């Protein structure tokens, strides 16, 4: 059980309104990801839900009950911090046991739960170690272990993978997704990495300057971004945004074409351009093209494409894959 | 980078200071050892004679010696208790966000800059004086009998005066340690259901262990040889009630003119201090490592 609802939640620090007012529904069992650029208020929003910051206005409901004024411990949520925030002087065992001990659970029960969590997270061999003697990935797992033993209504993660190297990040990403499947618990996950957001989320919340730009499933955001900000933020490589005559031809102020929706040809196409850089990844080729009348454009071609810097190519956007945006930055129907 | 050549050069350039330091320590120690084997009284110059370990015997069997040991330990432990508990409490207070934090912190640190003799005189004449003192005035305004601090509670009074001087030091060290505590750890504990007392006991206090260790080590070294506060206020009395080891040695040498006996006392004090140091390092060294 972990449904969270935010109604007009505001937060200001001093005179600065960091969160000017957010409405959001998080359903039980959902994996929700907050994404947005650095400083947009993702952590602040998460901390408001956790109760580590007091809201300046609005209401936070957890499982239908007003939790706006409840202290963090009574909200039934567990948080995994970016720095892991493990207790350095306690063994892994005592770290994981800490929330249970605070809740006054009896020793035998604590032992059973800690060992259960350790087994789930492959930590059984490390129970006697201190956090300082663990690798980054192991520390991460201890932090998750400390969260799961409490059987919280929802898990809150604040950029939990940002201190890990790329390979470990991919495997921990899978582990967290598996954990979500297994526990079926609500998870709210903050990241600024849109790949993490796309791969893990049931629902993505795109934030910009403390306000929600769009909420939707990863594919919804990919297929129908509500505005320029979301269009540019979701997808890798970034969507090409083209203004001027080429956009006017589509009856819009700005048009957006994803690199994977450009068809390249040596002979003919809508836009002509010269390749400046070609990145060959084997499975894909990324071509950075200086297009005539459309500016710098990135194109993604499946497999290998035999073009190098200086070559002339012709690009054609796929029909029905051109996003049109009005002067206010909003998507046009 | 350390080749044989550079190492030799390093030794050579270090030598003068090492030699100076050794001489600084070794010569006085050797002289003290030598004097401690003489019958050497300042009132009878030219009458020095070798007496072996007789001075040690006198010093150790002097009833004042046992009292001095007890007083020294009471003083050290009493001041440590007050400064550790009081310092932690003050540091916790000063760590709270409040108006005028900078000035308050400066004021708290101020006593550390007051010379022991001066602070002892202030305490003696302005605070604890049975007639003119502030405490006496407070007691009288409340209709109570004023306490004659140095007559009735002499050692306790000394402990209070010394603790007052050391409290800022403890507070400062503990405050800096407190400020280095990762706020996310505290928040994590809060989310885990720990109340303020549990956060203090399970998170803050273990984090402070190292700082508290440093305070204990440094204070003990200085507290074993408290002198000025005693000299200025009670002169070791009444009787031997406030005579610690340092004051006993002073009394032996300069009040009884017995250089031999005082030297023997000095050697004994050095040995005792080393025993305490070994115990402290054993006990506390573990804390510093992890
Ligand atoms: N305690 C605070 N006092 C004042 N301003 C704050 C405080 N905490 C956050 N802010 C401001 O609020 C804004 C949002 O901060 P927040 O930490 O939520 O960003 P974020 O989206 O998590 O960024 P990042 O991806 O870099 O972690 C920032 O502009 C920040 O400067
Ligand atoms: Mg953040």
Image (cartoon, coloured by chain):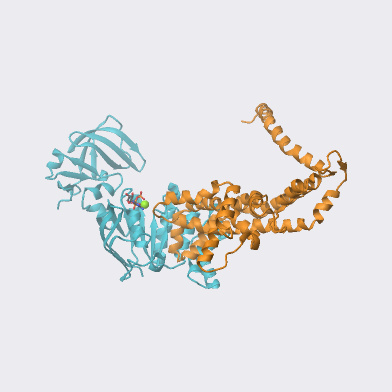
What hue does chain A carry in this figure?
cyan
Residue at (21% x, 45% y) in the render: A256
The x and y percentages for residue A169 are 43, 51
Q: Is residue A105 visible?
A: yes
Closest to the observer: A120 or A187? A187
The x and y percentages for residue B272 are 74, 51
Q: Is residue A107 above or below residue B202?
A: below
Closest to the observer: A19 or A204? A19
Closest to the observer: A322 or A248? A248
Q: Is residue A86 visible?
A: no
**Quadrant of image for the N terminus of chain A:** bottom left
Closest to the observer: A84 or A122? A84
Q: Is residue A277 above or below residue B171?
A: above
Q: Is residue A117 left or right of residue B160?
A: left
What hue does chain B carry in this figure?
orange
Residue at (80% x, 54% y) in the render: B60
Q: Is residue A195 above or below residue A271?
A: below
Q: How many marks?
A: 0
- In the rendered image, which quarter is residue A22 located in? bottom left
The x and y percentages for residue B37 are 84, 44
The x and y percentages for residue B38 are 84, 43
Residue at (39% x, 58% y) in the render: A157
Q: Is residue A276 left or right of residue B280?
A: left
């Amino acid at each position: 059980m972990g449904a969270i609802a935010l109604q007009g939640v505001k937060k200001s620090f001093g005179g600065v309104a960091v969160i000017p007012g957010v409405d959001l529904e998080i359903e039980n069992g959902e994996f929700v990801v907050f994404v947005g650029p650095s400083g947009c208020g993702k952590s602040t929003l998460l901390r408001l839900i956790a109760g580590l910051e007091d809201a300046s206005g609005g209401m936070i409901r957890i499982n239908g009950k007003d939790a706006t004024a409840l202290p963090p411990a009574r909200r039934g949520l567990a948080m995994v911090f970016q720095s892991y925030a493990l207790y350095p002087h306690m063994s892994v065992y005592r770290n994981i046991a800490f929330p249970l001990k605070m809740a006054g659970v009896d020793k035998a029960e604590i032992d059973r739960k800690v060992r259960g969590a350790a087994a789930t997270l492959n930590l059984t061999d490390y129970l006697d170690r201190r956090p300082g003697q663990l690798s980054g990935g192991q520390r991460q797992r201890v932090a998750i272990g400390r969260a799961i033993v409490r059987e919280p209504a929802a898990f809150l993660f604040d950029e939990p993978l940002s201190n890990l190297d790329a390979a470990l990040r991919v495997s921990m990403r899978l582990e967290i997704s598996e954990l979500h499947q297994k526990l079926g618990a609500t998870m709210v996950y903050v990241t600024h990495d849109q790949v993490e957001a796309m791969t893990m989320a049931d629902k993505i919340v795109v934030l910009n300057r403390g306000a929600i730009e769009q909420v939707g499933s990863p594919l919804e955001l990919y297929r129908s971004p509500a505005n320029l900000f979301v269009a540019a933020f979701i997808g890798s490589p970034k969507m090409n945004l083209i203004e001027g005559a080429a956009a006017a031809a589509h009856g819009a102020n700005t048009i957006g074409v994803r690199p994977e929706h450009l068809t390249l040809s040596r002979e003919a196409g809508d836009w002509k351009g010269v390749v400046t850089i070609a990145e060959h990844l084997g499975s894909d080729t990324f071509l950075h093209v200086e297009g005539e009348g459309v500016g710098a454009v990135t194109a993604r071609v499946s497999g290998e494409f035999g073009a190098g810097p200086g070559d002339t190519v012709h690009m054609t956007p796929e029909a029905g894959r051109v996003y049109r945006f009005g002067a206010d930055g909003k998507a046009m129907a | 980078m350390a080749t044989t050549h550079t190492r030799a050069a390093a030794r050579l350039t270090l030598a003068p200071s090492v030699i100076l330091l050794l001489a600084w320590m070794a010569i006085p120690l050797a002289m003290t050892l030598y004097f401690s084997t003489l019958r050497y009284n300042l009132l009878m110059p030219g009458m020095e004679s070798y007496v072996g370990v007789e001075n040690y015997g006198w010093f150790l069997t002097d009833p004042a010696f046992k009292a001095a040991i007890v007083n020294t330990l009471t003083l050290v432990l009493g001041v440590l208790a007050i400064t550790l508990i009081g310092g932690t409490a003050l540091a916790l207070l000063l760590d709270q966000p409040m108006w005028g934090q900078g000035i308050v912190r400066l004021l708290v640190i101020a006593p550390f800059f007051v010379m022991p003799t001066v602070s002892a005189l202030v305490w003696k004449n302005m605070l604890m004086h049975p007639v003119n003192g502030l405490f006496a005035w407070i007691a009288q305004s409340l209709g109570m009998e004023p306490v004659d601090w140095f007559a009735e509670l002499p050692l306790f009074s000394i402990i209070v005066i010394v603790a007052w001087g050391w409290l800022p030091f403890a507070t400062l060290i503990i405050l800096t340690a407190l400020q280095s505590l990762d706020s996310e750890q505290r928040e994590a504990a809060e989310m885990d259901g720990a109340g303020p007392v549990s956060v203090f006991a399970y998170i803050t206090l273990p984090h402070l262990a190292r700082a508290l260790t440093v305070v204990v080590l440094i204070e003990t070294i200085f507290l074993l040889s408290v002198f000025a506060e005693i000299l200025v206020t009670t002169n070791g009395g009444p009787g031997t009630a406030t005579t610690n080891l340092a004051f006993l040695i002073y009394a032996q040498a300069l009040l009884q003119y017995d250089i031999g006996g005082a030297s023997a006392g000095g050697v004994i004090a050095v040995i005792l201090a080393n025993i305490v140091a070994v115990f402290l390092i054993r006990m506390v060294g573990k804390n510093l490592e992890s």
